[in-house]
Amino acid sequence: MTKFRPCIDLHDGRVKQIVGSSLSDSGAGLKTNFETDRSPAWFAELYKKDGIRGGHVIMLGKGNEQAAKAALAAYPGGLQVGGGITADNAKEYLDAGASHVIVTSWIFPEGHLDRERLERLSKTVGKKHLVLDLSCKRVRIDGANGAAPRWKIAVNRWQTLIDIEITAENLADLSRYCDEFLIHAADVEGKQQGMDDELIVFLSKHSPIPCTYAGGARTLADLEHCKEISNGKIDLTIGSALDLFGGTGVKYDDCVKFNKA
């Protein structure tokens, strides 16, 4: 059944909410919706108190490692962590308290799937502790007017679009190595302008393992809508719209009640 999944997005060691499409290596043009002096551990302790499991601690760039580990230590086994994860450092985050590590760019070097890396990572941490982040952007195919929507995977903090699509075949293939998928709709992430309904429906039909969608949720009704159009198969992350992060569209307490109901 569809559940609300919380998040702790980290940038420069602080909890922030950022417009995903504004991320860049240089930092120029970064659009921040929210920033707080509250520690990552404070948010982790809140999620622990309310029994909200499976939240994502995302390290947006370097300098967030200690902040992430502080959050994991505050809620052992209750949070997943991603951002800069490789087969060499994944185990240290599990040892720090993560239930899963989340990986994307490292398995797609130079825009191609490195199956040897994926297999090594899956064996290192165990399939049940691995989440693959297949965050994506819509693509327009010339001459395909009226065709079904298509999405390509975006890596390197969603800056680089690679030539691998979100398809039923690719989801089935990659699911053999991991426990869950995390998929941000990078085009709408952080904008509070509505979700990519077609992506949610596609994932509900074709993902053979649990999947969490993120991007564009702005009201509590979006939780109900996600549940309805996915037949309860897709979980939903809400970030910038949440009152915890300065938003006005969704109350965190209502999300807790949704999960408990």
Image (cartoon, rainbow, N blue to C red):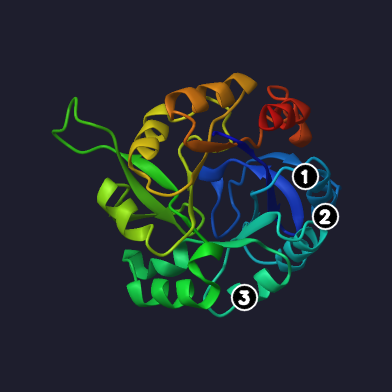
Q: Residue at x 70, y 73 (%)?
A: 95
Q: Would you say the residues marked 2 and 1 are in contact, meaning their CB atoms lie under 8 Å apart? A: no
Q: Residues within 10 Å of mark 1 (few under 14, many from 20)?
A: many
| Residue matched to label 2 | 41
Say which residue label 1 marks.
Answer: 47
Q: Position of residue 212 (x, y in %)?
A: 52, 43
Q: Amino acid at mark 3?
A: Lys
Find numbered disc 1 in the image and state the secondary structure of the residue it sits on. Answer: helix
Q: Provide the secondary structure element on which disc 3 rests.
A: helix
Residue type marked 2: Ala
Query: Please, which residue is most extreme toward the top here?
Result: 221
Of callouts 1 and 3, the N-terminal one: 1
- The crowd level at tag 3 (other Cα within 10 Å; few <14, some 14-19, many 20+) is many
Residue drawn 73% across and 61% down?
A: 68
Q: Circle 3 is placed at which residue position?
A: 91
Q: Residue at x 71, y 67 (%)?
A: 65
Around disc 2, counting alpha carbons within 10 Å, would you say few (fewer than 14), some (14 to 19), or many (20 or more)? many
Distance of label 1 from label 3 (alpha carbons): 23 Å
Q: Amino acid at mark 1?
A: Tyr
Q: Is residue 55 left or right of residue 49?
A: left
Residues tagged 1 and 3 counted as in contact (Cβ below 8 A): no
Quarter of the image with the C terminus is: top right
